[in-house]
Amino acid sequence: MHTSGKVLAFLVVLLAVTASVLTAKLVQVRNSWTAKSVASKNKFNDISPKIVALQAQIDSLNNELFRSRELWGNFFFPVQTEVVNQNDGTVRVGVGSDNGVRDKFLMHGFETAEDGTSIYRGSFLPVDIQNNTATMKPNWRANPEEIRTWKTGNWRWRNLVPPGYVENFDKQLTTILKHEETLSDRVRTLKGQVKLLGEANAKLKLREAELVGGDILPKTESVNPEFRDGLVAAMAAAEEDRNQTLLTIDKLRREVRSVQADIDQMLSDNIELTKRLPQAGAANPLSVRKNESSVNK
């Protein structure tokens, strides 16, 4: 056989062996891919319901997100917020015209705590707008005591809130304002009553002084004693004067009685002496008078 034939025969045998090996590998690879295809198909069949459920959940979340955006609008977080006036509630926020803040652009502020919770602080209107900052004031009558509880920090700001949320806030605000007005009325009433009580106490003290005396009464001599020393002291002095007058009157009465007794005794003695005179029958009156005059002497 020719040498080239031998070489060709050897190559044919080598190619046949190579083809056999490659065919075996091809069969092996095909079987592997077939197994993977079957496994993938089974896995796809297994996860298809989950994919459908997840897609439905995604659609539901997208719808909820859409509704939330419709109700809550755009939000800015975190926004550095500083309380610059604790009397009227003026705040300075870290968003401005570059973030879409415009004049009469109502914003709703939520103060956030460290644990992630938030507190609704009400609606605000911008009064001074810069590129990256804005100054806002409450769009409602803020209570200074409540404003003092606000803390400077990162707040969440929204341009919309659900109507029910605002309605509940307005109801609570109205209730608070009613209580504040009632409290103010009662405080004013209490102040008036305290003033009246002070005036009544002053009048009571004056009346007590007019009754029992005191330093608030005038001490001039031209004032009557009851207005200078008190009614009790004046009555005591008047009673003492009356008692002294009664004693003096009693003494004078005793003296009068004594003098009257002396007079009565003297008259009685004269009558006795007159009876002892000699009786002259029909003596003339002139002689009797002379005799009586001589007896009296």
Image (cartoon, rainbow, N blue to C red):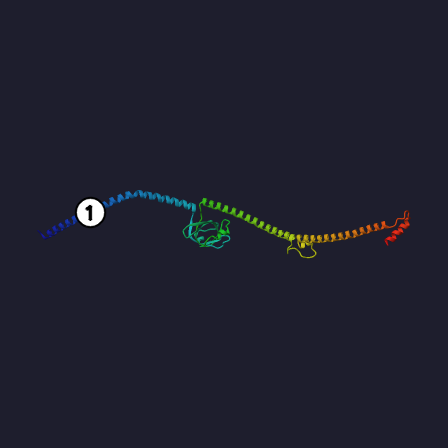
Residue at 55% across, 48% down: 186
Does 221 sit above or below residue 43?
Answer: below
Identity of the amino acid at label 1?
Gln
Image position of 257 (left or right of 33): right
Q: Is residue 145 visible?
A: yes
Give the farthest residue toward the bottom.
220
Side (left or right) of 231 relative to 127: right
Residue 205, image x and y in percent? 62, 52
Quick check: 29 left or right of 239? left
Q: Residue at x 20, y 47 (%)?
A: 28
Residue identifier under label 1: 28
Residue 148 location in percent, x, y? 48, 53
The single residue placed furthest to the left in the displayed view is 1
Most foreground residue, 168 or 267: 267
Height in image: 66 above or below 221? above
Q: Is residue 63 left or right of residue 200?
A: left
Q: Quadrant of the C terminus?
A: bottom right
Which residue is painted at 35% across and 44% down in the image?
A: 57
From the viewer's side, name the closer residue of 201 and 92: 201
Looking at the picture, tell me which residue is in the foreground, 6 or 45: 45
